[in-house]
Image (spheres, helix red, strand yellow):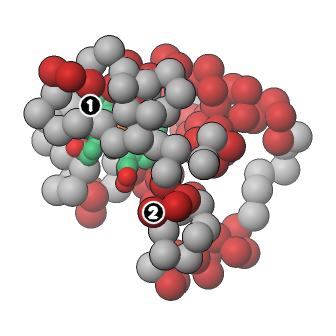
């Protein structure tokens, strides 16, 4: 936890103008995430009721952290499908469902650099909706 926070402090934001990135992140969010996590990230998407694991409200990610910092790196890794998280985030991991990171890569004509930028934008969008 502590090391994550340190990593984030030096990582900073991507060099693009924030507005554009957040906007694209929102578009991808609505395509890939809103069905479960809800249009406003509150965990109430149309599919949420029929899932074994209820999708969490994504507007409290920052408040949930003891550091009070938005957990940028962790969110990025959940979306990309870090195998270390496959047990705790089974809905995201390879066990039940396709990893959305992989979906985004496919949807970016398999260009990983584009997919990475889109995931970064997605995470920035999530950061922008924190309560
Ligand atoms: C099929 C439904 C579904 C879709 C689509 C989905 N998620 Fe999730 N998400 C879940 C569930 C359920 C959990 C709770 C952990 C688990 O079971 O995997 C979760 C957990 C999370 C978490 C961890 C929240 C926490 O409190 O630690 C984040 C962040 C997240 N999702 C982001 C996203 C993003 C970003 C997308 C789109 C790229 C997305 N999710 C798409 C169902 C979904």
x, y percent for residue 80: 42, 46
Please identify the quarter of the rendering in which residue 101 is found: top left
Q: Which mark is residue 76?
A: none
Task: Name the one closer to the observer, 30 or 95.
Answer: 30
Q: Nearer the viewer, mark 1 or mark 2?
A: 2
Label 1 belongs to which residue? 98
Q: Which mark is residue 64?
A: 2
The answer to whether 41 appears left or right of 14 in the picture is: left
Does mark 2's beta carbon lie closer than 8 Å to ligand 1? yes
The answer to whether 80 appears left or right of 26 in the picture is: left
Which residue sits at x=75%, y=64%?
12
Which residue sits at x=84%, y=50%?
15
Residue 4 sits above or below residue 55 on the image: below
Which residue sits at x=21%, y=31%?
97
Which residue sits at x=49%, y=33%?
41
Q: Does residue 73 appear in this view?
A: no
- Could you tell me if the residues under marks 1 and 2 are in contact, i.e. CB atoms within 8 Å? no
């Amino acid at each position: 936890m502590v090391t994550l926070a340190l990593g984030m402090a030096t990582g900073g934001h991507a060099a693009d103008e924030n507005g554009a990135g957040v906007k694209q992140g929102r578009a991808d969010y609505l395509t890939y995430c809103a069905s479960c996590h809800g249009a406003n990230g509150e965990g109430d998407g149309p599919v949420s009721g029929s899932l074994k694991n209820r999708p969490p409200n994504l507007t409290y990610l920052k408040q949930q952290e003891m550091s009070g910092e938005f957990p940028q790196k962790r969110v990025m890794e959940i979306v990309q499908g870090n195998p270390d998280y496959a047990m705790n985030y089974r809905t995201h991991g390879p066990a039940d469902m396709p990893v959305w990171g992989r979906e985004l890569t496919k949807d970016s004509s398999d260009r990983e650099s584009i997919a990475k930028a889109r995931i970064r934008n997605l995470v920035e969008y999530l950061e922008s909706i924190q309560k």
